[in-house]
Structure formats: structure tokens, C-alpha cells
């Protein structure tokens, strides 16, 4: 004897699990952007390959403690420019590389050059500064953990960012796209207008 099948509604536990999985996927960090190829600059394939080779070489020099501080600083500055040329900020592992360098005791100008690159890596080509603010919080915690001092040069990089962010936040033309604008045209009083004089007609 077969009994009719009874369809039961999903339990509260099942609903909770589904919602938890959905929220976890929605709140997960976005995937890092792909490697850059120069973007709108329209670089040739040879130029892109050469810049990527230079990127690897400059990373090795900037991270090499056996090199002079001046050479490492110049390599870090050049590395930031290569990232700009490739438009590859935020690729996988990039910010981790910068943080690994900043976790060591460094001369002021080298630390500042790496901090500038880390800011851009944290921003990751996004239109907002959330990643940059998180980077500075991470750097502060890393400096405390590793007992690494943040130099005055690196602090100037932070202050320049904060000043720029504060300036942009005060601009009325930068606002949420959801904001609605109302254009008010003042009424015109045509009664105050006078007719134009007739032009002189000389024979």
C-alpha cells in the first residue's frame, strides 16, 4: 500500500543556510582585475611585453636588501610608473608584495615610494577610496606588529591622500548618481525690456 507524498515547506534551518550562503557570496571581496595592457594608451604587444619584463626586474631590485637604498628607491619609483603605463593596479598579489616590503625597516624615501604604490594597488582601479583607507589601517597594524616605524616621508604620502580625499568630498559636483537635481530658472520680467534703437540710415 502506497501512501500519498506529502510536500513539506522548507524548514527554517534550510532557509537560514540558503540566505547565509547567498549573503556570503554577495559580500565576498570582488575578484582582482586582470593584468593590464596599457588600457586606452593602445600599447603594442611588444611594448606590453617589455613593460612586464621591466616590472619583474624592478620588483627584484626594489626588494633586494643587498642593493643600495638609492637604487632601491629609484627602482620603486620606476616600478610605480610601469604599473601606471600598464594600467595594472590591483592585480592578484600586487598589494601583498607592497605590504611585504613595507613590513621591513626601510629608509624614509624608499618607504614613501612603496607606500605610494601600495595606495594605488589598494585602490585597484576602483572609483572610490575605500581600498586606500583600508590600506592605511592595514599598514598601521602591520607597523605595530612588526615594530616598524612609519617615516615622516610616508606620513606625508598619507596626508596628501587625506587632503585630496577631503577636497573631493566637499565638491558639490561629485555626488551619488542616485541624487536628483532640480534646475531652477528665475522668472523673466519682460516689462523692463526696452526696444532696441533703430539703426541710422544714412543716404
Image (cartoon, rainbow, N blue to C red):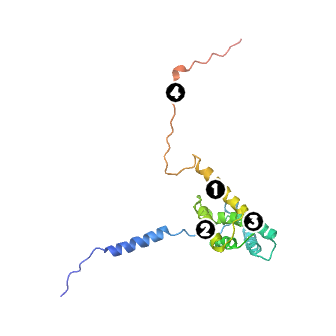
Q: Which residue is mark 4?
A: 188
> Viewed as shown, does residue 95 lie left or right of 16?
right
Residue 138's tag is 2
Looking at the rendering, in which quadrant would you find the N terminus?
bottom left
* Of callouts 4 and 1, the N-terminal one: 1
Q: Nearer the viewer, mark 4 or mark 3?
A: 3
Few, some or many residues within 10 Å of mark 4 (<14, 14–19, 20+): few
Few, some or many residues within 10 Å of mark 1 (<14, 14–19, 20+): some
Q: Nearer the viewer, mark 2 or mark 4?
A: 2
Real-space Cα separation, disc 3 to disc 2, in angstroms: 19 Å
SS assignment at label 4 = loop
Tell me, yes or no, whether the two marked residues, 1 and 3, touch with CB atoms within 8 Å: no
Real-space Cα separation, disc 4 to disc 1, in angstroms: 45 Å
SS assignment at label 1 = helix
| 146, 30: nearer the viewer | 146
Tell me, yes or no, whether the two marked residues, 3 and 2, touch with CB atoms within 8 Å: no
Residue 108's tag is 3
Tell me, yes or no, whether the two marked residues, 4 and 3, touch with CB atoms within 8 Å: no
Amino acid at each position: 500500500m502506497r501512501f500519498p507524498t506529502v510536500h513539506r515547506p522548507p524548514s527554517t534551518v534550510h532557509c537560514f543556510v540558503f540566505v547565509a550562503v547567498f549573503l556570503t557570496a554577495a559580500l565576498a571581496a570582488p575578484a582582482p582585475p586582470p593584468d593590464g595592457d596599457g588600457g586606452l594608451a593602445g600599447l603594442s604587444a611588444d611594448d606590453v611585453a617589455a613593460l612586464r619584463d621591466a616590472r619583474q626586474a624592478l620588483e627584484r631590485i626594489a626588494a633586494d636588501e643587498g642593493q643600495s637604498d638609492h637604487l632601491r628607491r629609484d627602482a620603486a619609483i620606476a616600478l610605480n610608473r610601469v604599473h601606471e603605463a600598464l594600467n595594472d593596479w590591483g592585480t592578484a598579489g600586487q598589494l601583498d608584495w607592497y605590504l611585504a616590503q613595507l613590513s621591513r625597516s626601510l629608509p624614509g624615501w624608499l618607504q614613501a615610494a612603496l607606500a605610494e604604490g601600495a595606495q594605488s594597488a589598494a585602490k585597484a582601479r576602483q572609483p572610490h577610496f575605500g581600498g586606500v583607507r583600508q590600506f592605511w589601517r592595514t599598514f598601521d597594524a602591520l607597523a605595530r606588529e612588526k615594530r616598524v616605524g612609519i617615516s615622516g616621508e610616508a606620513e606625508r604620502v598619507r596626508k596628501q591622500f587625506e587632503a585630496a580625499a577631503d577636497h573631493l568630498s566637499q565638491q558639490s559636483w561629485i555626488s551619488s548618481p542616485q541624487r536628483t537635481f532640480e534646475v531652477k530658472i528665475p522668472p523673466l520680467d519682460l516689462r523692463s525690456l526696452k526696444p532696441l534703437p533703430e539703426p541710422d540710415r544714412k543716404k
